[in-house]
Structure formats: C-alpha cells, structure tokens
Image (cartoon, helix red, strand yellow):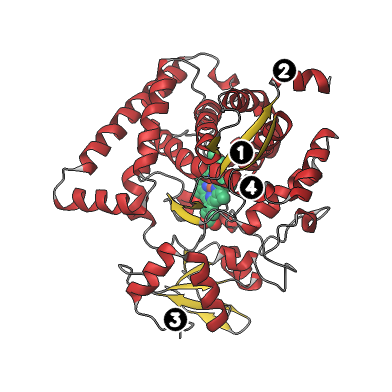
Amino acid sequence: MLPPEPKSPPVVQTLRWAFRPLPFMQECRERIGDNFSVKFLGFERPMVMISDPAAIKALYTERAHGLPPGREVFLEPVLGSRSLLLLEGADHLAHRKLMLPAFHGERMRSYEPIMEEIVDANIDSWPLGEEFRIHPQMQAITLDIILRVVFGVAEGPRLENLRRLLTDVLEETASPFTQLMALATRRFTGRGPWAQFEGTLREVDELLYAEITERRAEESFEERDDILSILMAARFEDGEGLADVDLRDQLLTLLLAGHETTATALAWTFDLLLRHPEPLRRLRDSIEAGEDEYMRATITEALRLRPVVPLAGRRLNAELSVDGLTLPAGTDVTPAIWLTHTRADVYPEPFAFRPERFLGEAPDTYAWVPFGGGVRRCIGAAFSEFEMRIVLREVLTRCELHKADPAPEKIGRRSITLSPKGGTPVVVTARHPARERDLAAA
Ligand code: HEM
C-alpha cells in the first residue's frame, strides 16, 4: 500500500502543486506525515513524496532505479534522445563517466577570469539609483557563462546569434503552460507555436553543428579548456568519442539544466542576503579578508532554504524498504526537497536564514539535496557553486545595493525551477569600477 494522499481530488492537488507548492507540501506533511502520495493530473500513477534522509539515502543509493515519469515528454523534443537527462542504465552511466571529468572542481579555477569578465560587464550595465530586477541580469550572466565557458564560443556574430536564439528557446520553455500548449499544438496540428519553436531550434542546431565542425578542424582543439572541447576529446571505454548529434544533445542539456537553475539560485541568494543585514555584513567582511568559508556556508544555506528544483525522483526498479516504509517496484518516488531541507530534527529553526549553521560543517549528503543524488546527482553542482561565488563576490565588492521591496519574494515557477515571482527588484546606490577593486586588493 502506498502512503496516503491528501483528501482533495487530483485536479485540486495538481493546481495546488502548480500554484502554491510549498504551502501544499507543508500541509501534507502536517496532516499526513513524512511520506505521502500526490496524484497529478495526466499521470497514471501517484508520486510518493518522501523527506526522511534515511529514506532518501535508500532511494539514491540504489543504482537500478529508472527515470521519473514525464521527463521525456517535456525534454526530449528540445534536448534530443541522447541527453544525459534522458539516458538510462548502462548508456547513462557510460555517458556520465565520460562527462564528469569536465566538471571536476579543480578545473573551475581556469574559468575564473572569463566568468569575472562576464559578471563585471553585466554589473557595469546596471542603472544607478533606479529600481531594476536582478533575476533577469543573473539570467544574462549565466547564459553568457554557458555560451563562453561551456560551449567555448568566442565573441562574434555566432555568439550573438546563439545568445538571441537561445534566449527565445529559454523563454518558450520557461512557462509550464506554454510548454503544454506547444506540445498540444504539435500533437494535434503539427503547426502553430510548436512549428515556430522548431524553426528556432533548427537555427540553433545549425550554429552548434557549425561550431562543432570548426572545432574538430582546429588542430589543437584538445588544448582548449572549454567544456565542449573537453567532451570532444573524451573517449568511452571502447575508444569511441561522442558523435556530433550526441554532442549537440549534451550542449542543449547543459544549457537547459545549468542556466535557469543557477540564475534562480543567485536571485534567491540576493533576496535572502539583502533582507538579513548581519549575514550580509559577515559575508562582505569575509570577502574582504579573502576567506571562503562564510561564502560556502551562505550558498549552502541559500540552497537549503530556497532549493530551486523542487523534486528529483525515480521510478523504482526494485522494492524500496526503509524504517517502516515499503514501496513496491514500479512506484514513482521523489524526495520533496524543500520538506527535507526544513526538517526541524535536522535543522533547528528551519525557516531562519542562518549561514552559520554550515560553518566548518559540510551538509549531510541525504538531508541536503538541492542537486539530487546518487548516480544522477547534478554534474554541474561544483560549476554552479563556483559561478555563484564569483557573482556574489563581484556584486558585493563593487556595489552598494538594497532590495527595492523589503518583503520576502513570493514563489513563482519558471522552467523547471521555483523562482522569485517579482524577479527580486533591487536598487544600486553606488558602484565601484572593477579595476579600482583590483587595485585596492593589490
Ligand atoms: C544551482 C544550480 C543547479 C541546481 C539547483 C541543479 C539541480 C539539479 C538536479 C536536482 C538534478 C537532478 C538530479 C537527480 O535526479 O538526482 C540535476 C541534474 C543535472 N544537472 Fe543540475 N543543477 C544546477 C546547475 C547545473 C549546471 C550549472 C549544469 C551544467 C552546466 C547542470 C547540469 C546537470 C545535468 C547534465 C544533470 C543530469 C545528470 C544525470 O542525469 O546524470 N546543472 N541538476
């Protein structure tokens, strides 16, 4: 027997999940307990939500489990069938093994100058003394970082075209409603918004294939350190490399998985920091002192309190049995990430923003799961945390800024993320030139 469901019918459960996900989950926890089942409209089986770290450990350490339902319906038309997010079993593991070295922590250091340049250029474009939303600025920064650091595209017309077209693709995939409409018109008419969207995607593909072909022709591309070049040089155990179509699918996957998520995590971190003067002061002091620990703790705490991806589930391929919970093979199960992160037995004062709780202490692997876990854990986790450090450091050393509205941001939905509904409006009252900061540091 699966854990109980809320009493409301599936349509109400789906709407509450869509529009007010956190209060809905909170209510389920209070009324039903740690484990409950939700019936989403359009899905044949209920989704069991769990939040006990022991149960999450049992789920994530079993390698045999499959993908959660629905993923391919939304992702395959855009990402392609070779996407790491869609592969399963041995094929998935082989691709993961090939891709992981490109995302190792030490490699990140070499990306620092280019990331810093992108962030500084963006900060220079912010208005002074006028309200603006910081979330779209974070999106522009994370898109440019993906295009230049991950795709390795140099400044020039191709970069500009990719930036323009991918912004369209990302906008189209941002709203779950437009996604559904696009898929419906595709299914029933083969025309409409979907056809237009496919046209944009084809243009993107042409540019990406042109980049891949040129890169292959470059004699010394194996010396380049962008992620596309590293993936092109990587080999499976049988000595084969990734085919062009495979590379294209992985590039779009890295873009879709890595762009909005990191931008949203940054927007939430600003929302939290700018409402909490003491942690903000401590973070500024630690940056000035050249220390990293408070920064690490701040990012960990922001991802705890505002996990940007709400669910990272599996379809069980084997029975899951832990602490009185037994779920048969075939069940769809997911950690409810925010419920896990707000457990009072793991995190005292769970709703307070207190980076101090992580000072000198790494978070528990299965009680802190903003990046999922096990063999499908996010491969961009170190990349995004590194990127967040640079953005926070540059903004906080160069700008005096405050929130335009002191109230906490409400939660909205964008693409796969739970994002700040108002885009986190801020006002910058003073800005120091990047060079001045460097001189001061010297
Ligand atoms: C704060 C930023 C990010 C968050 C919160 C995040 C979150 C996640 C989550 C929850 C998963 C699913 C894990 C699971 O099913 O267990 C995932 C998978 C993935 N992420 Fe991220 N991600 C972030 C940034 C990035 C970045 C920057 C990249 C790459 C540039 C990236 C690439 C991927 C890929 C390729 C997967 C699929 C892994 C697999 O199936 O083996 N992510 N991410």
Which-is-in-front pick, marks 4 and 3? Answer: 4
- Which is more toward the observer, 318 or 341? 341
Query: Marks 2 and 1, Cα distance to the nearest angstrom?
Result: 30 Å
Residue name at image x 30 percent, y 49 percent: 178
Which-is-in-front pick, marks 1 and 3? Answer: 3
Q: Are marks 2 and 1 in contact (CB under 8 Å)?
A: no
The amino acid sitting under disc 2 is Arg
Instruction: Check residue 168 in the rendering and tell me which mark sits there, or answer none.
Output: none
Vertical arrangement, residue 5 with respect to residue 72, above or below: below
- Residue 249 position, x and y percent, is 40, 38
Residue name at image x 75 percent, y 50 percent: 297
- For the N terminus, give its image quadrant: bottom left
The amino acid sitting under disc 3 is Glu
Give left or right: position of 402 versus 332. Answer: right
Instruction: Check residue 435 in the rendering and tell me which mark sits there, or answer none.
Output: 2
Q: Which badge, 1 or 4, is on the more N-terminal residue?
A: 1
Query: Marks 4 and 3, Cα distance to the nearest angstrom?
Result: 33 Å
Q: Which residue is mark 4?
A: 269
- For the C terminus, give its image quadrant: top right
Query: Marks 1 and 3, Cα distance to the nearest angstrom?
Result: 40 Å
* SS at badge 4: helix
Q: Which badge, 2 or 4, is on the more N-terminal residue?
A: 4
Instruction: Check residue 5 in the rendering and tell me which mark sits there, or answer none.
Output: 3
Q: Which badge, 2 or 1, is on the more N-terminal residue?
A: 1
